[in-house]
Amino acid sequence: MRNTAESHDGSFKLFYRKGWAYLTVYPPGENGMPVYAEQIQNRMKLLNVPVVGSRKILDIIETAEGRPEPLVEWPEGEQLTSRIRVEISEDKMSAHMIIDAPKKGAGPPTFAEVEEELENQGVVSGIDKKAVEKVLAAEDYGKRILAAEGTAPVFGKTRELKFHFNTNRGKPWLEMDFDRINLKELNFIENVKKDDLLAELLPPVTAADGIMVTGERIPASSDMETISINAGGNTRLDEDGSKLYAAIDGNVRIVRGAVLVEPVIKVDNVNYETGNIRFDGTVVIKNSIADGFVVEAGGDIQVGKGVGRARLSAGGNILLKAGISGGGEGRIECRGNMFAKYIESSTLLCRGNAFIEEAVLHSNLTVWKHCVLSGRRSEIIGGSIIVGGSLWCKKLGSIYDTPTYAALGVPPDLFIAYREARKKQEENREALNKADEQLDRLENALQEGSANERILLARGQLSVQTEELRAESSGLKIEVSELRDTIKASRHSILVVEDTMYKGVTVHFGMKEYHVPDRGVRRTILRSGESAVLDSGYNPGSRPVLVFD
């Protein structure tokens, strides 16, 4: 049996490259058959390679070094080569390419050829040599690959402020998009220890121009604004003002741009053992608040279980992991956002957004931003709700036609001022009617001859009172008219009812009023139109998007 390594036959390759036909001849083993000139000439005929003298072919066969040798000029071989397609993005920050497989008779494309074609198409910067070579080595033809990427400019900054705590706590809508909010997972409190690093100024960033794949430069801009750390209460800066540390244990947060650490009070319950709590920082109550007690906090309030006929006031957020059953006496005020499982028979004043998981029952809510109900029930029954932004729920009202009032799209301060002015106007009208009736009776008594001193004195006093009431009436009329003219609902505010809105519900967008028909309304979105409230269907597949700040 012949030794395989010594018996292999010679071989050759004939291929086109850059206008020429190239010939590579590989020598045979010791006992192998050599390559014959006739074999090469036959292949040349098949490929329509121009004829060349036998001596040149024989010289290459004799040397047989396995190295491509130029054989003859062959311009027509161009049609056999790979086609390299280049796509440059509109912003000229990336270029993709597709390398087609070469036809039989053409050599595989080389990196130099690819680079040349990229340059011909205007791609001269950011070429990914490794990605191109990988495709060529694997002969992975026909695939679209990223061939080059530009370099984005680096924005120059004097200093950059980095926080070492979560500055975006308690905003579940950013991730959950109105799916059910898990109140058990919300936590507005981020405790830090004394001497913990809270924030630091990073070194300046030098501006650097960017460059497109076409070689064009992108000038970099710089922000020369002076940045410093705004140190709030219970924090300390290092000597050069570049690092901020906690001065006490407590809850870290940002208030009006300043980083502060507020002490945290933690109690099991608020009852006769603790008394009312009034505290500048944050209050965490593990269990519940008993009826009649008050909790006031300059920071956040977090309650683990139920709240009854109590009063809560917070300078930050309020989180009720259960809810409040106020019995008509419960009252909540917060300058931040409100989170609760339910609100029943209570009053809420919320300067931020209100997120209620399941229900609002027979309560009066005033919310300066959005109010979203996102749980399984998500229903509002009875009472009134004034929302400066949008209102989102599944059910509004009840099958028993419970009177339920909603006003949307107007800053609550303005709407409340208008409502109070209207109330004063009604009270003034009633008082004026009553005074006029009394004055008429006195005039009749005088005409009938009962002109004693007491009646005359009463008529004089009543006349003065009536004039004062008429003057007040004129002033109230102007005030109500001016307020009415300024009450215009935002076109961005919407009422979304995912399931049913029942008879008994009245909705206001500014001065535009909407009454639910007797049959109720299913799956609807209301918004303020030019002259009336517009009603359109709600499609779960293309839900509107609320913008939170």
Image (cartoon, rainbow, N blue to C red):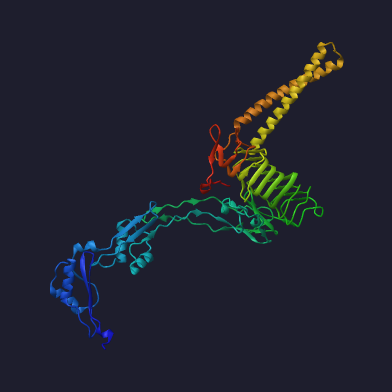
Q: Position of residue 486 (x, y in %)?
A: 60, 32
83 w.r.t. 42: above or below:
above
Q: Residue at x 75, y 25 (%)?
A: 431
- 417, 523: nearer the viewer: 523
**Is 56 on the left or on the right of 359, as rendered?**
left
Q: Position of residue 102 (x, y in %)?
A: 27, 65
Q: Residue at x 74, y 23 (%)?
A: 432
- 246, 444: nearer the viewer: 444
Q: How many marks?
A: 0
Q: Is any atom of residue 434 visible in this view?
A: yes
The N terminus - image quarter: bottom left
> Hey, which quadrant is residue 97 in on the image?
bottom left
Q: Position of residue 408 (x, y in %)?
A: 61, 39
364 w.r.t. 250: above or below:
above
> Hey, which quadrant is residue 361 in on the image?
top right
42 w.r.t. 4: above or below:
above
Q: Position of residue 106 (x, y in %)?
A: 24, 66
104 w.r.t. 291: above or below:
below
Q: Residue at x 33, y 64 (%)?
A: 141
Q: Is any atom of residue 351 visible in this view?
A: no
- 335, 225: nearer the viewer: 335
- 465, 372: nearer the viewer: 372
